[in-house]
């Protein structure tokens, strides 16, 4: 091992090659082309709940620019299972207590925080302090102040930050953005977006516990509606007013059940959003001067579907949104390509979330917003 250091060697063997060839007893010098693998960035998932298990880890299996290099879990029983399933070396397994030691691990380039919302800020800041690039799940945090703290920690550490907004890497979303940008059907006059599902699960789940979630439907699904209203117009709202509805107070004791909000945009367009833990709705409708475009479903893992007023179907090959999202962020780190979901976007959405809660508290009053182009990604 005279030419490459042990650390570099360790990093290379953990980058997928180890998972397949080495563990199967194949020697390194077997003629396999490792150059593509070498370029992949190692991601460590923090929190192995349903999203990491069902979407992120499977999405990483076919990713081109990153791979699942490590895990951080508070449940020891998951360690062996994940090591086996994803060929993760023991050196890349952490728990919430020893997590900061990840700083010494060159195999991990990116830490992806997939914990309950109120834990995002703490773990993102720890990851940044460990010198790792950060992906923070949505909603970015439970307050604007926490978003600022995450952004600040990443800036100070000189690491990149992205929010887990998978829709920003999705071709259906990008087709709507293209219609808006190119004015295919003229200017946008009205946008309407729904993001909701009926929650009937365990009433003690963290999503219904304000201390862990920071809020109910608005924090969970509402951020999708906020996002699609904004890319459906191509601008940030200049004001918002909102209403809250509760029909199952025994179940939604601690968090909001249903919220509707109206937005005003700088070009005069109006926006409606609906989010709920007590209805199934998943749609974006954009009304232009000379027609309309609709995605329905719009915010789920796909396949999505869309159509336009002139009878065209919006259709793309179905790919894992999570794979595309993580690949986009890895390319941003490696090659400086666009960060489609920067921290500023997550903070902007939290400013709107706080304005919506403020409006509800003040009886539906219109709350002005001064966001300029904050969080608008154009390329
Ligand atoms: P989950 O309940 O399935 O998993 C939560 C994980 O956090 C578990 O591994 C659990 O053990 C761990 N955890 C640590 N401390 C905990 C505590 N005090 N209480 C509860 N769990 C604790 O949740 P999930 O659906 O995987 O969601 C995790 C995050 O991912 C949330 O922020 C959520 O908004 C986000 N998410 C995003 C998407 C998306 O499409 N981008 C989809 C689902 C979830």
Image (tube, rainbow, N blue to C red):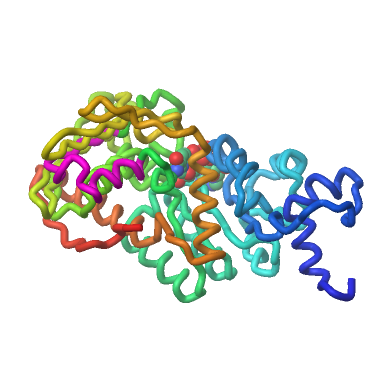
175 magenta-colored:
yes
Residue at the image position 51 percent from the left and 74 percent from the top: 157
The C terminus, quarter of image:
bottom left
Instruction: Pinpoint residue 242: horizontal percent, then vertical percent.
Output: 15, 42
Q: Position of residue 57 (x, y in %)?
A: 61, 42
Could you say which is closer to the camera, residue 104 or residue 143? Answer: 104
48 versus 329 height, above or below = above
Evaluate whether residue 276 shows in this view: no
Drawn side of residue 34 relative to residue 175, left or right: right
| 35 on left or right of 6 | left
* Residue 349 visible in image: yes
- Counting from the top left corner in percent of width and height, residue 20 is at 80, 45
Quadrant where the N terminus lies? bottom right
* Vertical comparison of 297 with 90: above or below: above
Q: Is residue 245 left or right of residue 169?
A: left
**Is residue 260 rendered to the left or right of residue 297?**
left
Which of the two residues, 31 or 345, is positioned nearer the viewer here?
31
Residue 279 covered by magenta stretch: no
Q: Which of the 4 image quarters holds residue 344?
A: bottom left
Say which residue appears at 25% left-offset and 30% top-offset.
308
Please name the residue shown 29% across and 46% down the image. Answer: 177
Exactly how many numbered labels are in the figure?
0
- Tell me which residue sits at (65%, 57%) in the image: 40
Residue 216: x %, y % from top left: 33, 39
Q: Which residues are magenta?
A: 173-194
């Amino acid at each position: 091992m005279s030419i490459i250091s042990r650390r570099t060697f360790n990093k290379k063997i953990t980058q997928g090659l180890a998972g397949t060839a080495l563990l199967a007893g194949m020697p390194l010098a077997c003629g396999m082309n490792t150059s593509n693998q070498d370029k992949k960035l190692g991601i460590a998932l923090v929190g192995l709940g349903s999203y990491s298990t069902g979407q992120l880890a499977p999405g990483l299996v076919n990713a081109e620019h990153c791979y699942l290099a490590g895990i951080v879990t508070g449940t020891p029983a998951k360690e062996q299972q994940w090591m086996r399933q994803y060929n993760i070396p023991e050196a890349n397994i952490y728990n919430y207590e020893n997590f900061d030691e990840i700083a010494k691990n060159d195999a991990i380039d990116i830490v992806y925080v997939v914990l309950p919302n109120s834990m995002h800020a703490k773990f993102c800041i720890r990851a940044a302090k460990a010198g790792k690039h950060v992906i923070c799940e949505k909603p970015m945090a439970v307050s604007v102040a926490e978003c600022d703290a995450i952004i600040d920690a990443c800036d100070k550490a000189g690491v990149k930050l992205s929010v887990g907004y998978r829709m920003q890497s999705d071709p259906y979303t990008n087709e709507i953005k293209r219609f808006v940008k190119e004015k295919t059907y003229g200017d946008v006059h009205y946008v309407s977006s729904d993001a909701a599902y009926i929650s009937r699960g365990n009433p003690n789940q963290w999503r219904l516990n304000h201390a862990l979630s920071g809020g109910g439907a608005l924090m969970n699904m509402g951020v999708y509606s906020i996002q699609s209203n904004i890319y459906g117009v191509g601008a940030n709202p200049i004001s918002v007013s909102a209403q809250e509805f509760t029909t199952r107070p025994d179940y939604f004791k601690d968090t909001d059940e249903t919220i509707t909000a109206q937005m005003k945009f700088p070009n005069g367009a109006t926006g409606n959003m609906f989010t709920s833990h007590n209805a199934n709705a998943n749609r974006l409708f954009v009304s232009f001067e000379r027609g309309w475009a609709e995605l329905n479903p719009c915010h789920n893992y796909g396949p999505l579907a869309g159509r336009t007023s002139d009878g065209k179907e919006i259709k793309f090959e179905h790919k894992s949104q999570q794979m595309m999202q993580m690949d986009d962020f890895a390319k941003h780190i490696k090659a400086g390509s666009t960060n489609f979901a920067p921290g500023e976007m997550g903070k902007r959405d939290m400013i709107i979330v706080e304005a919506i809660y403020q409006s509800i508290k003040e009886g539906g009053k219109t709350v002005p917003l001064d966001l300029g182009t904050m969080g608008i990604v154009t390329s």
